[in-house]
Amino acid sequence: GPFESIGNLTETHLKAYVDANYTAENMVVAAAGPVKHEDMVKLATAALGGVKAGAPRLAAEKPYFCGAELIYRNDEMGPTAYVVAGFEAVPWKSPDAVTFMLMQQVLGSYKKSVGLVPGSISGNRVINVVANKMGVGCAESYEAFCSFYRDTGMFGFYIECDEVAVEHAIGELMFGVNLLSFSVTDEEVERAKRELKARLFSTPTSAEAACAELGGHMLAYGRGIPAAEMMLRIEAVDAEEIKRVAWKYLNDAEVATTALGPLHGMPQYYDLRRGSLMHRY
């Protein structure tokens, strides 16, 4: 919201927010380690048995994804522009969710002068072309993202680049997204699988991390997802499946974008929207 609303916040507003959202149906109690389920139920009942249930919620329709742009051009804030572009994706429980996670890894992430392998010799096509564009690269960093929610999702990329390279950086990332529908190799998919497994299963193994992961699974799926099941779901995806999902959700699709900074090179929204499909003659 606007900055003005922060100053108007009162204790009453905060209490109303907590009472409306910190309710029994929004809570998950997770435990890891040598503990019995019966003991956990007794402890949870004693500590949280008095938490009230929230008011019944009306069944809401799936949010409508509206392609749009929100641009804040400020040529005085320095030479770096910040751009985000996103497409509508799928919810957590969608059978295509794992494919989106792999597509995120296919696009990858890049930060200049950071990492074991320089971007200029990376095997990732998008990273390689971004690092070598015009001989100096067209972005300081970029990152593909994929966020899932209960009834929808968001897939896209975030870029930090010099003001003179905005058009090049956006163009290369949009082209990378477009290629997911047409040109994905088995090599790219296998590399994406290795990177996704490393990201999912190389996290800390403490009891706190295990509880956080289990709680997240309960909110997203309604049950815990064993590592073996997730591995099988990842292995079941191949290049043709990625092309199918990308064609269904990303090809010729609405795109929402927002940007901040010196944006004199920012493409018009019409051109950005046309960049979501392949033009062949």
Image (cartoon, rainbow, N blue to C red):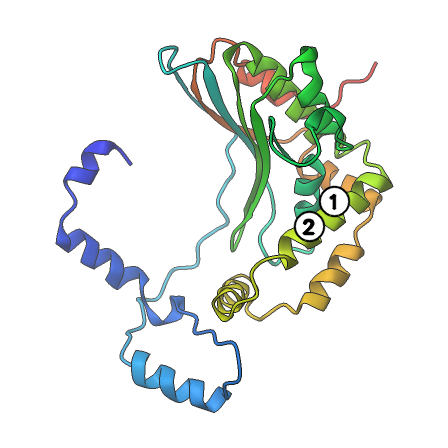
For residue 204, which quarter of the picture? Answer: bottom right
Residue 277, visible in the rendered structure: no
In the visual, does 187 lie left or right of 146?
Answer: right
Q: Which residue is mark 1?
A: 192
Name the spot of residue 262 as percent of width and height, x first: 44, 13
Q: Are marks 1 and 2 in contact (CB under 8 Å)?
A: yes
Q: Which residue is mark 2?
A: 196
Element carrying mark 2: helix
Q: CA distance from mark 1 to mark 2?
A: 6 Å
Given residues 243 and 159, the one toward you in this image is 159
Residue 187, visible in the rendered structure: yes
In the visual, does 281 lie left or right of 132?
Answer: right
Number of numbered markers: 2
Q: Locate the N terminus by quadrant.
A: top left
Q: Residue at x 54, y 9 (%)?
A: 164
Given residues 58 and 45, the one toward you in this image is 45
Residue placed farthest to the right in the image? 186
Q: Residue at x 59, y 21 (%)?
A: 139
In the visual, does 195 lie left or right of 9?
Answer: right
Element carrying mark 1: helix
The crowding category of the residue bearing disc 2, from other C-alpha atoms within 10 Å (few below 14, some 14 to 19, many at least 20), is: many
Name the spot of residue 109 as percent of width and height, x first: 63, 35
In the visual, does 93 lie left or right of 123?
Answer: left
Is 166 drawn above or below residue 68 in the view shown? above
The crowding category of the residue bearing disc 1, from other C-alpha atoms within 10 Å (few below 14, some 14 to 19, many at least 20), is: many
Q: Locate the C terminus by quadrant.
A: top right
What amino acid does circle 2 point to? Leu
